[in-house]
Image (tube, grey):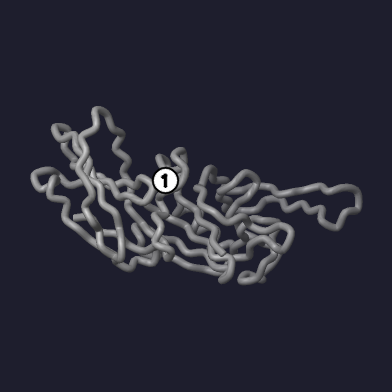
């Protein structure tokens, strides 16, 4: 039974995969805009393909490849009806069913598991000139404590040094979701590109997220 959800948990479409009737179920993965369903059976070497159009999952074909790699994930679609799991191949293989969305216009972070919202809280993203880049990446490292500093030159007002910052999730090189003890202005842009949160919120997301959890920044 294949179900497709928006990131907020709304069911978009569903279909039963007939070839999986005598198996233990199906593995589901994504290739471009096509949903692939592979029966959980070592004796069955087939992949059924479906395309989502106008909230209907339409069977396209059943293929029997000589070799295949089964990718296990939950199919999650965002509000633009694009498959959010369809990210770069390296990230795709490491992405857990958990998903973090940061909305720049709302200055708010949403945490989803299997398309169901688990938590939501205000954040502070990059101010003008230090904009937090949009796109889909993933958590690549976790640090319980981390130091942040940057030196632009002698007496440059942009210089900063922020030691002992708690609960840090890296989602791009030099960019993190992390706590901020130096301000309480969440809901407004404040950072040099990172995603600032309160200390309690940072601790929650730090322990909730895994290495490989998808992180999407959207406008």
Give the residue drawn at x 56%, y 48%.
171
Q: Tell whether 162 sits left or right of 86.
A: right
Give the residue drawn at x 18%, y 42%.
39
- Tell me the element at label 1: loop
Q: Tell whether 218 sits left or right of 86.
A: right
Q: Quadrant for the C terminus, please.
A: bottom right
Q: Choose top left, top right, bottom left or bottom right for residue 107.
A: bottom right
Q: Quadrant for the N terminus, please.
A: bottom left
User: Percent position (x, y) of residue 193?
Assistant: 67, 56
Single out the residue that lies furthest toward the right. Answer: 155
Q: Is residue 170 placed above or below 68 in the rendered structure?
A: below
Packing grade of label 1 (10 A; few <14, some 14-19, many >=20) is: many
Give the residue drawn at x 72%, y 63%.
128
Q: Choose top left, top right, bottom left or bottom right for residue 177.
A: bottom right
Foreground of the two, 176 or 36:
36
Q: Is residue 211 placed above or below 102 in the rendered structure?
A: above
Count of numbered badges drawn on the protein: 1
User: Percent position (x, y) of residue 163?
Assistant: 71, 50
Single out the residue that lies furthest toward the left. Answer: 22
User: Percent position (x, y) of residue 156?
Assistant: 88, 54
Q: Tell whether 70 sits left or right of 81.
A: left
Q: Which residue is mark 1?
A: 95
């Amino acid at each position: 039974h294949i179900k497709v959800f928006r990131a907020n948990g709304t069911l978009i479409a569903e279909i039963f995969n007939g070839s999986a009737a005598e198996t233990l179920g199906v593995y589901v993965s994504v290739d471009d805009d096509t949903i692939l369903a592979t029966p959980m059976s070592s004796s069955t070497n087939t992949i059924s393909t479906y395309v989502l159009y106008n909230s209907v999952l339409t069977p396209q074909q059943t293929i029997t490849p000589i070799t295949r790699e089964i990718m296990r994930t939950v199919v999650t679609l965002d509000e633009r009806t694009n498959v959010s799991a369809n990210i770069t191949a390296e990230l795709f293989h490491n992405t857990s069913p958990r998903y973090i969305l940061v909305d720049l216009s709302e200055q708010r972070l949403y945490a989803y598991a299997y398309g169901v919202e688990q938590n939501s809280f205000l954040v502070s993203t990059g101010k003008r000139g230090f904009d937090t880049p949009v796109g889909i990446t993933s958590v690549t490292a976790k640090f319980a404590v981390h130091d942040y500093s940057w030196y632009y030159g002698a007496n440059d007002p942009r210089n900063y040094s922020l030691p002992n910052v708690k609960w840090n999730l890296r989602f791009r090189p030099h960019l993190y979701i992390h706590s901020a003890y130096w301000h309480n202005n969440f809901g407004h842009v404040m950072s040099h590109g990172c995603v600032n949160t309160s200390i309690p919120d940072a601790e929650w997301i730090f322990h909730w997220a895994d290495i490989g959890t998808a992180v999407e920044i959207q406008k």
